[in-house]
């Protein structure tokens, strides 16, 4: 699993795994636009279901500019993840620099009505160098 998803963070019974890839076909380096796709897998190793309610991302570019992105669910869903199951999705991130990082958290709802924040591990965004 580590080979497919090299970045991971555990919060209690929830593991968030990330794989990222640079997408040259969606990037325009001459216009300072680099684009990455990231694949997220959220695993529930507990004995009760959990539901993903909201997301919070901190996206930092090579100049140190930080952007906070918050919203409901992921890719239009607020998935319920049963014990022993996982939820996968793919999304993307543009940057105005060839490198940066992403990290954040998901607000999760337990079956008993309590909430917790599941950590999204910090992962690098690395594109090709630009030469003038």
Image (cartoon, rainbow, N blue to C red):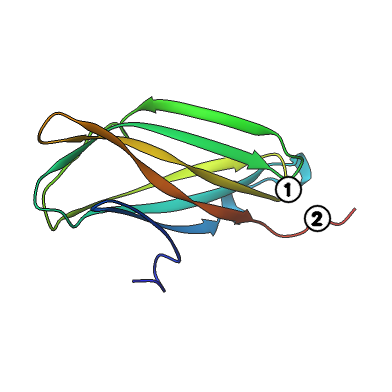
Can residue 125 be seen in the rendering of this structure?
yes
| 24 or 70, nearer to the observer | 70
The answer to whether residue 97 is left or right of residue 120 is right
Kindly state the secondary structure of the residue where label 2 is placed.
loop
Residue 49 placed where, x, y %?
11, 44
Residue reaching furthest to the right? 132
Q: Quadrant of residue 53?
A: top left
Residue at 51% from the left image edge and 44% from the top image edge: 103
| 56 or 126, nearer to the observer | 56
Give the mark nearest the N terminus, 1 or 2: 1
Can residue 23 be seen in the rendering of this structure?
no
Residue at 33% from the left image edge and 71% from the top image edge: 1
Residue occupied by mark 2: 130
Residue occupied by mark 1: 29
Residue 113 placed where, x, y %?
14, 28
Residue 79 placed where, x, y %?
20, 38
Mark 1 touching mark 2, by CB under 8 A?
yes
Residue 69 placed where, x, y %?
50, 29
Residue at 54% from the left image edge and 29% from the top image edge: 68
């Amino acid at each position: 699993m580590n080979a497919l998803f090299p970045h991971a963070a555990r919060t209690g019974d929830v593991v968030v795994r990330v794989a990222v890839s640079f997408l040259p076909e969606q990037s325009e380096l001459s216009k300072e636009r680099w684009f990455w796709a990231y694949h997220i897998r959220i695993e529930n190793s507990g004995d009760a279901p959990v539901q993903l309610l909201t997301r919070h991302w901190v996206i930092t570019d090579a100049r140190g500019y930080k952007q906070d992105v918050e919203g409901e669910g992921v890719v239009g869903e607020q998935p319920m993840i049963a014990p022993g199951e996982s939820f996968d999705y793919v999304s993307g991130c543009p940057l105005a620099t060839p490198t940066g990082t992403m990290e954040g958290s998901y607000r999760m709802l337990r079956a008993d009505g309590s909430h917790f924040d599941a950590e999204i591990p910090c992962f690098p965004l690395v594109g090709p160098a630009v030469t003038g």
